[in-house]
Image (cartoon, rainbow, N blue to C red):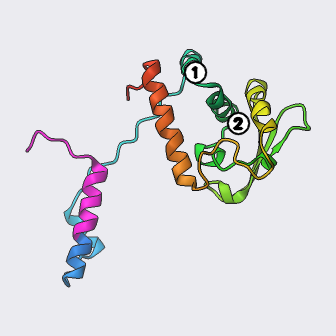
Amino acid sequence: NAQRQIAASTIKHKFSQLKGFLYYMGIKIMKDDVRINLSFPKIIKEEPHPLQLEEIRKILEYTSGKKKGLYLSLLSSGMRIGEAVQLRKMDFDLSKERVMIRIPARMTKTRTGRTTFISKEAADFVRIKLRTLEDEELVFGSSEIVENARMNEIVTFERILKKAGLDQK
């Protein structure tokens, strides 16, 4: 169907699969032949929508107390969700004026450990949560399997966005 738009990434992926199949069948395609004879559409990456203060307030309005600590921590620290769900009580330092979090290198995307701080608002929720945990227990994660915990949080956040009326792309 000529009307149907196919994403640029889909076209590149399908071509890659075709090239692999042809190679398997004994047909080799040279990179220069592809470059000279084929043109692929550019992948367009839209800038993500930056949350406004009113949107953040609305999200927090529909968020349970347990999740508010997580979301406020993410907002104020710059952590990724995959990092946050792996944090254990022992990664938090409450001895400073602001709560300090040491993110071990094994948890980060770049494999570089770092230290971050969370806001006082986030700290209020986090301190309450930390009182009930042992040093080795997960603070924000729902599973020891990182991808499961990350996906659980993504699904939960999508539900909250829908309730808040902020689920449009």
The front one of 116 and 135 is: 135
In which quadrant is the N terminus drawn?
top left
Can you name the residue that lies furthest to the front here? 132
Q: Relative to residue 117, is residue 143 drawn left or right?
A: left
Q: Is residue 141 above or below residue 128?
A: below
Give x and y (percent) for residue 148.
Answer: 52, 51
Instruction: Mark yes or no: residue 130 visible.
Output: yes
Q: Which residue is mark 2?
A: 77
- Which residue type carries mark 2? Ser
Q: Name the residue rendered at 51%, 43% in the picture.
A: 152
Q: Which residues are magenta?
A: 1-18
Q: What is the CA distance from the residue labelled 2 to the residue labelled 1? A: 15 Å
Can you name the residue that lies furthest to the top here? 54
The front one of 124 and 112 is: 124
Q: Mark number for residue 56?
A: 1
Circle 2: is it few (<14), some (14-19), or many (20+) Cα within 10 Å? some
Secondary element under disc 1, as helix, strand or loop, is helix
Q: Is residue 118 above or below residue 80?
A: above
- Which residue type carries mark 1? Ile
Can you name the residue that lies furthest to the left here? 1
Q: Mark number for residue 137?
A: none
